[in-house]
Image: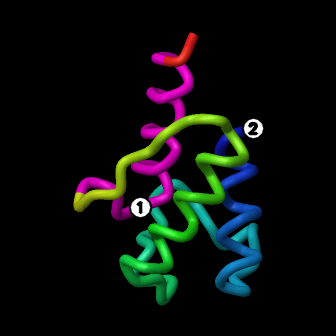
Amino acid sequence: MIFEKITDMLSEKTGVDKSEITGETIFAEMGLDSLDIAEMLLGIEEAFGVSIQAGPDIISVSDLVNKVETALAEKQ
């Protein structure tokens, strides 16, 4: 569910087809810069009700999914 929601958001923001987005997809390769990622994080925080800190350790879709999973686990 987390991966699917994130890929939906990425597809909407970038126009890249969801089927082309994998866990290994790098945000920079999709044309996203740090501001785009920060904006996306705000949407993710709202969608999942968690707080995610932007940082250099979030460069791929799987990095972001792991951050959300960790934040959700800590919230419980």
Q: Identify residue type, mark 1.
A: Ser
- Tag 2: amino acid: Met
Number of callouts in the render?
Answer: 2
| In-front residue for pair 23/65 | 65
Tell me if 56 is positioned left or right of 11 in this view.
Answer: left
- Residue range highlighted in magenta: 57-74
Q: Residue at x 68, y 79 (%)?
A: 13
Separation of residues labelled 2 and 1 (CA atoms): 17 Å
At x 27% / y 58%, what residue is drawn? 55
- Near mark 2 (Cα within 10 A), the count class, few <14, some 14-19 or many ≥20, is few
Magenta-colored stretch includes residue 37:
no
Describe the element under mark 2 as helix, strand or loop: loop
Residue 69 part of the magenta segment: yes
- Which quadrant: the C terminus? top right
- Earlier-in-chain disc, 2 versus 1: 2
* Residue at (57% x, 58% y) in the render: 42
> Horizontal placement of 28 versus 13: left or right?
left
Say which residue label 2 marks.
1
Residue positioned 43% across, 39% down in the render: 67
Main SS category, magenta section: helix
The residue furthest left is 56
**Could you say where residue 71 lies in the image, as x and y percent from the top left?**
48, 29
Q: Which residue is labeled 1 in the image?
A: 60
Q: Residues within 10 Å of mark 1 (few under 14, many from 20)?
A: some
Q: Position of residue 75 (x, y in %)?
A: 53, 18
How far across and down, in percent of the image, does residue 48 sit? Answer: 68, 38
Which label number is shown at residue 70?
none
